[in-house]
Image (spheres, rainbow, N blue to C red):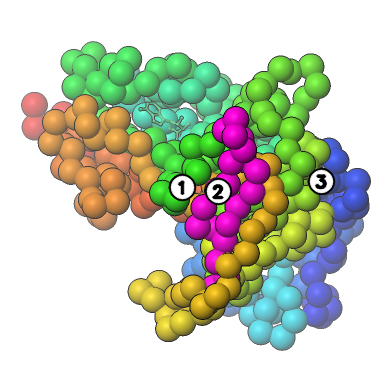
Amino acid sequence: MPNMSLKKVKMREQAPDIRNGNFNEVALGYTAEEAVEEAARCLQCKNRPCTVGCPVSVKIPEFISKIAAGEFDKAIDIIKETNSLPAVCGRVCPQESQCEALCVRGRKGEPVAIGRLERFAADRSMEKPAAERNTAPKNGIKVGIIGAGPAGLTCAGDLAMMGYDVTIFEALHVAGGVLVYGIPEFRLPKEIVRREIDNLKILGVKIECNFIVGKTMTIDELFENGYQALFIGSGAGLPKFMGIKGENLNGVYSANEFLTRINLMNAYREEYDTPIKDFTRVAVVGGGNVAMDAARCAKRIGAKEVYIVYRRGMDEMPARREEIHHAQEEGIIFRLLSNPVEILGTEDGWVRGMRCVEMELGEPDQSGRRRPVPKAGGEFEMEVDGVIMALGTSPNPLISSTTEGLRINRHGCVEVDDKTMMTSRPGVFAGGDAVTGAATVILAMGAGKKAAVAMDQYIKAKNKQS
Ligand code: FAD
Ligand code: SF4
Ligand code: SF4
């Protein structure tokens, strides 16, 4: 008998007033009993609408039926057929707009907690060592992956399973991309990402860190070194600013820099000496996941008051609902329909405040969201000593500017053929944020998977001709 409760089984969490002072994971996961109870809410629909919402087509009813039956190892095997980072996706996928958005239980009540169940199966699994997975014999053909984020890691793993000699070139000193330098520990423990990367190493994937393609070596030089195909998964790490007066004052950070200092350079740990300002009152400008992460981090490193300053309303905010809810619970103050027009400084060049205008919503724009327009006479000042800009990012132009014949679009993103994932340079493939602009982990992984298949076909066809 299915469990007909209209609500998801609740997941245990750290209490808001405790967790806003530490970096430990907020959501604590299901116990086996809770997972079985939640899995029993799935109706095992014949037409499987939920799977259509998953960019990597996880076999959702199948894995959930295994959890309902207490066969947890079988559940994770099913998930891993199509998703190589389930512990990550179960935590950070925007399920409410993907798999769970199409779950029939959501028509009357809450959808089945697909993400939480995926996380449960991944965390619980005894992690079959990667070497035991079915991999093709090594073929000795060298392929190179640029960037060790979810797109690059997924592409590398799939190519290694096909027998290729895979090397990832990563600009930073650690692999993981945004999973390690952007998404904070309290949402995605770094240990989980490290475990996934260790699995790739067991498969034979080599990772060369501190290797900046375009500086250490260009794409042409990599080809000269025997790589038969390359995948660009270099993400979209270049922050945008508003271009308003005062943005170069001390105490103004891009969210990327702020989060990197915290996540990669451990600014929140006493034993680390990473320069980062001790804010008292800080304004985070933006309304996406990045803004929520930056605000929640600022609170955790001791800021007394943290504001989200966003020019539209709550309904238009692009951040995941769960992240907004968590931020509110943790005491983040939302200044909606507000837009900064100037950052005010002290005589010695530090932030002392921000001048904003009140906004109202007009007609919908191209994105379908109502366009914010300034309200007459609605100016106000906020007293803050720090400002974090979380306005979105675009790809860094280093690779495109050092690669002959690589076509990019007007947003600076690499252009690919949708079917083959190949760029305008033969043998060079691309995917993830480098192609789409800032998007999601699961879309980046999906692109990495698709590119791995395309690269395999390209190499086989090329070697057949020669
Ligand atoms: P990235 O993860 O950016 O990885 C690219 C890698 O390439 C990096 O490691 C970079 O150092 C490396 N690189 C760049 N240039 C070079 C070069 N020239 N040579 C060698 N290496 C290079 N998505 C979600 O689904 N859910 C969330 O909750 C979520 N929260 C987010 C929170 C934050 C703070 C941020 C910043 C993003 C968030 N995202 C979230 C978006 C998601 O993380 C990205 O869409 C995803 O990481 C893109 O993967 P990628 O592999 O394309 O790029
Ligand atoms: Fe849902 Fe993401 Fe899992 Fe797909 S990978 S089933 S979208 S949580
Ligand atoms: Fe189960 Fe919902 Fe998918 Fe139906 S739509 S199979 S209830 S998860």
What is the secondary structure assignment of the residue under circle 3? Answer: loop
Type of amino acid at the residue the image marks with label 1: Lys
Classify residue 333 by image quadrant. bottom right
Residue closer to the observer: 316 or 452? 316
Relative horizontal placement of residue 21, taking residue 245 as reference (left or right): right
The quarter of the picture where residue 41 lies is bottom right
Q: Secondary structure at mark 2?
A: strand
Instruction: State yes or no: discs 1 and 2 in contact (Cβ < 8 Å).
Output: yes
Dot 2 surroundings within 10 Å: few (below 14), some, or many (20 or more)?
many
Q: Residue at x 69, y 79 (%)?
A: 105
Residue 234, quarter of the rendered image: top left
Can you tell which mark lies on residue 245?
1
In this figure, which residue is indicated by the disc labeled 3? 304
Query: Residue reaching furthest front?
Result: 347
Q: Residue at position x 36%, y 41% from top?
A: 395
Q: Is residue 446 above or below residue 272?
A: below
Indicate which disc, 2 or 3, sits on the residue closer to the N terminus. 3
Q: Which residue corresponds to the image point at 67% horizontal and 64% vertical from the top-left?
A: 335
Residue range (magenta): 340-359
- Residue at mark 1 to residue at mark 2: CA–CA distance: 6 Å
Amino acid type assigned to the residue bearing label 3 in the image: Lys
Residue 125 is situated, as x and y percent measured from the top left of the image, at 73, 41
Q: CA distance from mark 2 to mark 3?
A: 20 Å
Type of the residue with mark 2: Ile
Q: Is residue 226 left or right of residue 303?
A: left
Q: Nearer the viewer, residue 3 or 111?
A: 111
Query: Residue 18 at what x, y percent from top left?
Result: 91, 46
Query: Between 143 and 374, which is closer to the camera in this rendering?
Result: 374
